[in-house]
Image: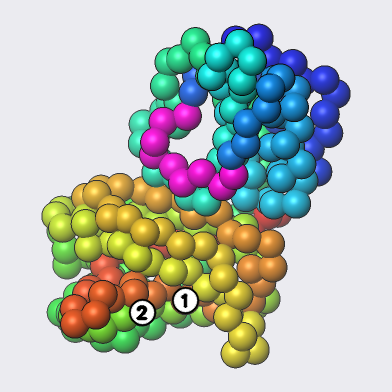
Amino acid sequence: MPICYCNIHYYQGQFNLKAYGSLTENFKVLFSAEGTTLLSAINKCSKFCSGDRRCIGIELCTVREDLYRCRVCCEWLRLTETPYLYSNSQECKYMEMSDEKSLNVAVNKPATMISVFKPNYQFAANAVDNITVCPTGLTTAHTGWEINPWMEIDLQGIFDIVKVLIFNRQDQSGHRLHDLSINVVENGKENGCGYFEGPGVTGGRYLVFCTSGSRGNRVRFVIHSRPGQTDVLTVCEIQIFVDQ
């Protein structure tokens, strides 16, 4: 499918001229729209992207000769081996925003949890030790079984959080990562960053993009338990990124 860029300016950044195959389903769509022409579909999605920094790319698809669809990526995406986001399609093309340099500000920062499953091993500090390989559950950060288990990372400074990368546990039980809200706290006020409904998979890596205004000095992670159930929050590593 030919791609017409038509000198469209994207407020949040410029998209690469390279077009990939279509998006896979390893992501949560931000916005979608249809138009009777390719340009009208592009305009609808680019207008949305002008006000939402989570927009890192636009997929354009030919539904039929008089109908085109655009989809905006993403609230979150699952990272796999490169290429991690695209499938081979003649009907759809994906334009990706240029990658900007970012800095992980979570390394070795103070971290706390509601409880620790095995107190001699599974500390909250394991989530910010800059080690992304966890061969056993003993090297993860792991709460006890709780209603709405939580973990909090103190960044020791005020930051505008752009995205959060979560390395799920790698030995077993990856499905326990689900219904996870991520909030950035400043002066007691929680600003929503994002939400990962899951369930995760063992060894999965999930990149959650924060909404505008995700500013604060602490980042709080909470699994929202279903009525009458308890959960554990267990991860190998959490990376919190700001633009440099």
User: Relative to residue 1, is residue 121 depicted above or below?
Assistant: below
- Residue nearest the observer in this picture, 130 or 37: 37
According to the image, label 1 marks what residue?
Answer: 220
Residue 24 in magenta stretch: yes
Kindly identify which residue carries mark 2. Answer: 150
Question: Where does residue 161 sit, x and y in percent of width and height?
Answer: 62, 64
Using the image, tell me which numbered label, if any, was put on residue 63: none
Residue 206 visible (yes or no): yes
The image shows residue 175, relative to residue 185, as above or below, that is: above
The part of the chain drawn in magenta is 23-31
Label 2 Cα crowd, 10 Å radius (few <14 / some 14-19 / many 20+): many
Residue visible at 39% across and 39% down? 26
Q: Give the amino acid type for the residue marked by disc 1 in the picture.
A: Arg
Could you tell whether 145 is left or right of 94 in the image?
left
Q: Mark 1 touching mark 2, by CB under 8 A?
A: yes
* Helix, strand or loop at mark 1: strand
